[in-house]
Image (cartoon, helix red, strand yellow):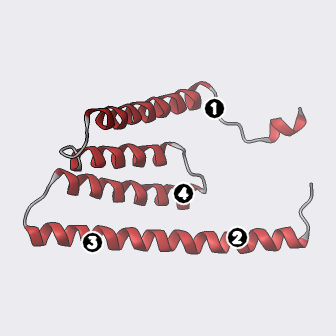
Amino acid sequence: MKPNKFSSLGQYGLGIVEQVVLIVIALATVVATYQQIAHIWQAWAVTVGDLLLLFLYLEVMTMLNHYLGSGKLPVRYPLYIGIIALARYLVLDIKELDAWRIFAVSASILLIAMAILLVRYGHVRFPYTDGTDLQSK
């Protein structure tokens, strides 16, 4: 289907909104990283929770950088962020968690890790095409 001028204008408008939101996310991540580093500096102590939070921010920045560079967002990056977030939750709240919740969070981490392996296997075994051969079929 050939896009008309209204759909082209809509795509252009959505593209601008997308870029603005990406800039807001990037700035918010940089500010949050700065605040966390300032907190570590002020407390003069580094905890595992602090490091995992910094890794979360790093993964978000890496995901934004990759998306801005290629225009594509691999599914793996949000999955990595999910694993780090669950690990941080587990590390920080281990004293308040009962055995079943610890098991559930650990199982969730395992399932996400298996999903990452499945996605990686799929990319190697069934690589993407450029889409031109799909239209000819």
Depth check, mark 4 against mark 2: the one in front is 2
User: What residue is drawn where x is 49% and y is 42%?
Assistant: 76
Name the quadrant containing residue 109: top left
State yes or no: discs 4 and 2 in contact (Cβ < 8 Å). Answer: no
Furthest residue toward left? 44
Residue 40 falls left or right of residue 22: left
Q: Secondary structure at mark 3?
A: helix
- The residue beneath circle 3 is 34
Instruction: Check residue 127 in the rendering and tell me which mark sits there, or answer none.
Output: 1
Crowding at dot 4, Cα within 10 Å, few <14 / some 14-19 / many 20+, comes out as some
Crowding at dot 3, Cα within 10 Å, few <14 / some 14-19 / many 20+, comes out as few
Query: Along the polypeptide, which appears first: circle 4 or circle 2?
Result: 2
Depth check, mark 4 against mark 3: the one in front is 3
- In the picture shown, does residue 98 fall above or below 39? above
- For the C terminus, the image quarter is top right
Q: Amino acid at mark 2?
A: Leu
State yes or no: discs 2 and 1 in contact (Cβ < 8 Å). Answer: no
Q: CA distance from mark 2 to mark 1?
A: 29 Å
Query: Along the polypeptide, which appears first: circle 2 or circle 3?
Result: 2
Closest to the observer: 16 or 89?
89
- The residue beneath circle 4 is 67
Task: Return the x and y of residue 54 as percentages of the image width and height.
Answer: 28, 58
Task: Return the x and y of residue 94 as percentages of the image width and height.
Answer: 21, 43
Crowding at dot 1, Cα within 10 Å, few <14 / some 14-19 / many 20+, comes out as few
Q: Amino acid at mark 1?
A: Pro
Q: Amino acid at mark 4?
A: Tyr
- In the picture shown, does residue 75 fall above or below 103? below
Q: CA distance from mark 1 to mark 3?
A: 39 Å
Depth check, mark 1 against mark 3: the one in front is 3
Closest to the observer: 76 or 82?
82
- The residue beneath circle 2 is 14
Q: CA distance from mark 4 to mark 1?
A: 19 Å
